[in-house]
Image (cartoon, coloured by chain):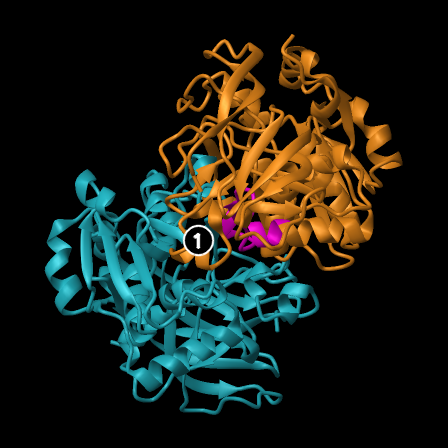
Amino acid sequence: MGEAVGTNEVFGYAAKDKAGHLAPFKFTRRAAGPEDVTFKVLHCGVCHSDLHQIRNEWKNSKYPMVPGHEIIGTVTEVGSAVSKFKVGDTVGVGCMVHSCHQCDSCEKGSEQYCEKVVWSYNANYPDGTPTYGGYSTQMIADEKFVLRIPDNLPKDAAAPLLCAGITVWSPMQYFGMNVKGARFGLVGLGGLGHMAVQFAKAFGMHVTIFSTSPAKEKEARELLGADDFVVSKDEEAMKAKAKSIDFIIDTVAAKHSLDPYIAALTTNGKMCLVGMPPDSLEIMPAMLTSGRKLVAGSAIGGIKETQEMLDYCGEHNITCMIENLPLSECNTAMERLEKNDVKYRFVLDIEH
Amino acid sequence: MGESGVVETLGWAAQDKSGHLAPFKFTRRATGPHDVKMKVTYCGICHSDLHQIRNDWRGSVFPMVPGHEVVGVVKEVGSEVDDFKVGQLIGVGCMVHSCHSCESCDNGLEQFCPKVVWTYNSVDTDGTPTYGGYSGELVCNRKFVLRMPENLPPDAAAPLLCAGITVYSPMKHFGMTEKGKSFGLVGLGGLGHMAVKFAKAFGLKVTIFSTSPAKEKEARGILGADEFILSTDKEKMKAAEKTIDYIIDTVSAVHTLDDYLALLKTNGKIILVGVPESPLQLSPTSVIFGRRFVGGSLIGGVAETQEMLDFCGKNNITCMIEKIPMSYVNTAMERLQKNDVKYRFVIDIENTLTSE
């Protein structure tokens, strides 16, 4: 892992600077080592993080940048020490390709909180080799970070599980937001949000969606199975929801007030933020103390739990609602994503 | 409860939001079948008393007799009361009634009952205003009367009834009790010093974050804190990042949550028990990276208050107080405003409550 640059010439799309325009890009991946899995990429989901990072919105972008961390493909080669995968397997790689494996977080299966975690793109291996993501024809990763995709799931629709899916699954499990009969609230119906709704229904919860888009209601109820839909600008409707929700997942990446959602929580209610608005949000402490409520955050999920989620999705036939676009139209995908004009995730067709 | 006849009682009350306290004669209900009548011996002064006599929270009804850290002895019990005896050492905290039929009451969280009645500045079930412990006597439903441990000095035990339970409850509920883990306390006052005492009793390593350098010596020497960091010392705060498992934040002034969230390890928790009147800023990345959370907590239920009192009795834990005569109460309020107390004023009602 992380050895000399290999001879694998790979074709992908990269941003050259913070204008964020993606263009064809030939590059070489690192040589595959004994523990690595090499696979031909078939599909890659477009995550909002891709948009943020090609534009250097998080102020840490390195160029050229090949984004993409919802990557699915077919194994073409395995290293000599690889035991879990073989040529021909359908596999995926999510947001991480390396961690230290020695710290508390790694030992507990939360590699994303490892101080030395290496992201699938816009990062560097310990030896300095840059990482390139899944908007490309080939991917190489240590088998510890490769996931098995259940055979019964459509490969394109399963791709966004690798980031959007696990980002909501992880906190829903960790914070116990999986109690049959409990009342679940979702703020922001997009890539992450629509997965949270599907998981919540699968866990047997009553689901209320809070959204700014009245247009999303019909599909939210009919296709996603939401029980209730509240337009967040409707003050009366929001007030009517006070103290009625046990758990909330907030996926919104724009600045918004948390108080109406904290008000919606019951006593001992929990809210988890997974979206990353760039600015700080405001909380009135009395909103929390008056009901022993909490506001948490969560980032993606560890490898073990990502595999658990994938297996669960395989068993329950849960995938993402996607729109396929060819890799060559990735810029169009970004423009439309910026306007939230997608139901609910773009997936790039890399293979063709 | 609420039988015929009332009893005249002497207390000290604020008549308006100037908050000036002065002698005040009023009536308490006669002892009903489920009531316990208490002769008050001591009452702690809580920051909430200061807020409410000045109408800081906008819900004050005057005249107001504050006081919800009330300790005394049983003077009389109602006919249906068999668990308290005349002469027994008892206490009443922040609540005197709840509905006993909602989910919160069923779960021992009477403080979240929609019909909870506070010990003062509230309306009792018979429509009368409630008056607190800055008074000679108090009549309370037995369900809200607590047994004070006989081995604890009653004056130093009084603040357990609000300050104590307000930190004990979240420390237990949020699991801040794992021996050897690292505990942080923000704001060393009435609530804070109790959090330190409980944390040491639970076997935690304690770091105090304070704005007052003067408090360090005592914090280490008397309270047993392991570390003391000035929150204005940017270097020390940075060096402490990601070292703390859990934090209790008692501060009532506006402050930057992100600074304290940064101190937490992965999966760390910060629980707010102070109530700043303005919003606090929270950067989502402070909770997302590291899966941390910010929670709030409000006093504690009756059963857990009794559990805490028994724990304190067993472990000889009481509060550090400054005992004052009733006549000093207005000065005490001014000093409390400036945090000039180590760490709770307690009024010696028994010996000094007079109509002067």
x and y, in percent, of residue B86 in the image: 68, 44
Q: Which residue: 20% across, 68% down?
A: A224
Report the front residue among B78 and A319.
Answer: B78
The N terminus of chain A: image quadrant: bottom right
Q: Which residue: 68% across, 40% down?
A: B160
Q: Is residue A150 above or below residue A61?
A: below
Few, some or many residues within 10 Å of mark 1 (<14, 14–19, 20+):
some
- Amino acid on which disc 1 is placed: Pro
Report the front residue among A255 and A41.
Answer: A255
In the figure, what tint was chain A given? cyan
Quarter of the view holding residue A45: bottom left
Element type at mark 1: loop
Q: Residue furthest right?
A: B221
Q: Is residue B293 magenta?
A: yes
In the figure, what tint was chain B given? orange
x and y, in percent, of residue A128 in the image: 62, 59
x and y, in percent, of residue B250 in the image: 61, 35
Q: How many marks?
A: 1
Report the front residue among A144 and A192.
Answer: A192
Quarter of the view holding residue A32: bottom right
Q: In the displayed structure, does residue A159 sit left or right of residue A210?
A: right
Q: Which residues are magenta?
A: B287-305
The C terminus of chain A: image quadrant: bottom left
Q: In the displayed structure, does residue B10 sit left or right of residue B191?
A: left
Q: Is residue A337 magenta?
A: no
User: Which chain is disc 1 placed on?
Assistant: A
Q: Which residue: 37% across, 86% down?
A: A150
- Please indicate, yes or no, whether residue B308 appears anywhere in the rendered image: yes
Q: Which residue: 27% across, 74% down?
A: A157
- Please indicate, yes or no, whether residue A62 appears anywhere in the rendered image: no
Q: Is residue A133 above or below residue B211?
A: below
Identify the residue position indicated by label 1 in the image: A64
